[in-house]
Image (cartoon, rainbow, N blue to C red):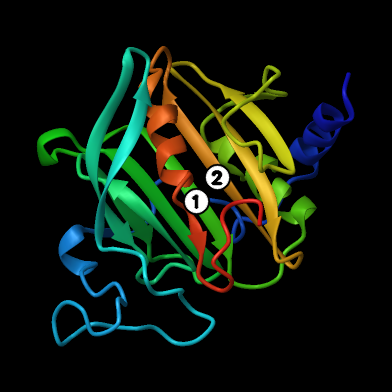
Amino acid sequence: MSLRIIVAMVLLFAGCSKQDAPQNTPSSQKISASTQTDSGKGNGGNSNTVTGKPGEWHPGRPDTKSGTIATANGSITVAMTLMYKDIPYSLYIPEDMVAERDTASPKGTRLRIYNAPKGKVNRGSWAEIYVPNEATTLMDLTGALLGSDGLAEQYKFKVTAPPQPFPHCVWGAETYAFAGKETEGYACLSVHATTKAFYVVVVQKKGEKNFPLRVDAILGEFQWNDDGRGLGG
């Protein structure tokens, strides 16, 4: 049995507090293209352009761009909109997906991403990015995922080590695979600027291959606000 799996099993029994655990049905606000047009491009665009405060966001990213998303049958090109408001990073969301930020937790920023074909949100598969407000150790955040009130317990996931090689989060310091009754997925944890741990969780319906690939395309455009680096930076 690998050390990573042993740690996961210990944390599953050790537990974590309810206030730290991710919630299954968060209060949220939808982040749409209409609220993201002031992307800080200097004097270009309208008079309400927001440039952002130093250290909060690196301006210069276009409001929209074309992105390539791999699928099980090839690749597609889609329009993507920049998202950055009220989150400690910026990324691009494809036009047929939607991002919702949890507004209930004062402890950190939790963003969930769903497919939304023809504007109808499909919550059967989702990706979650969580960044705590305060400095947090990797072990503490692992407990928030795998502890007694963590995400794995909420969804009754069996937690294992993912198959190797695992391409979806080469930037991750720790990686876990999930398996449930009708869903499967993975969690990737890492540390930004050596003082704040964060995680990305991807859960999809079993057999759905394209959703993780869509998430990969989104995370490939991820950029931290404080230093402009991508995941793992």
Q: Secondary structure at mark 2?
A: strand
Q: In the rendered image, which quarter is residue 161 located in?
A: top right
Horizontal and vertical percent position of residue 46? 13, 81
- Residue 165 position (above or below residue 218): above
Instruction: Residue at 43%, 67% (x, y): give it.
Output: 87
- Residue 118 position (above or below residue 105): above
Horizontal and vertical percent position of residue 112? 39, 48
The quadrant of the picture occupied by the C terminus is: bottom right
Instruction: Residue at 67%, 31% (x, y): give it.
Output: 176
Horizontal and vertical percent position of residue 135? 71, 70
Residue labelled with disc 1: 129
Q: Tell whether 117 sits left or right of 225.
A: left
Residue closest to the eye, 69 or 130: 69
Residue closest to the eye, 105 or 230: 230
Check if mark 2's residue and mark 1's residue have beta carbons within 8 Å.
yes
Q: How far apart in space, not on screen, are marks 2 and 1 (Cα)?
A: 5 Å
The quadrant of the picture occupied by the N terminus is: top right
Instruction: Residue at 29%, 63% (x, y): give it.
Output: 62
Q: Secondary structure at mark 1?
A: strand
Residue labelled with disc 2: 200
Horizontal and vertical percent position of residue 180? 52, 20
Q: Residues within 10 Å of mark 2 (few under 14, many from 20)?
A: many
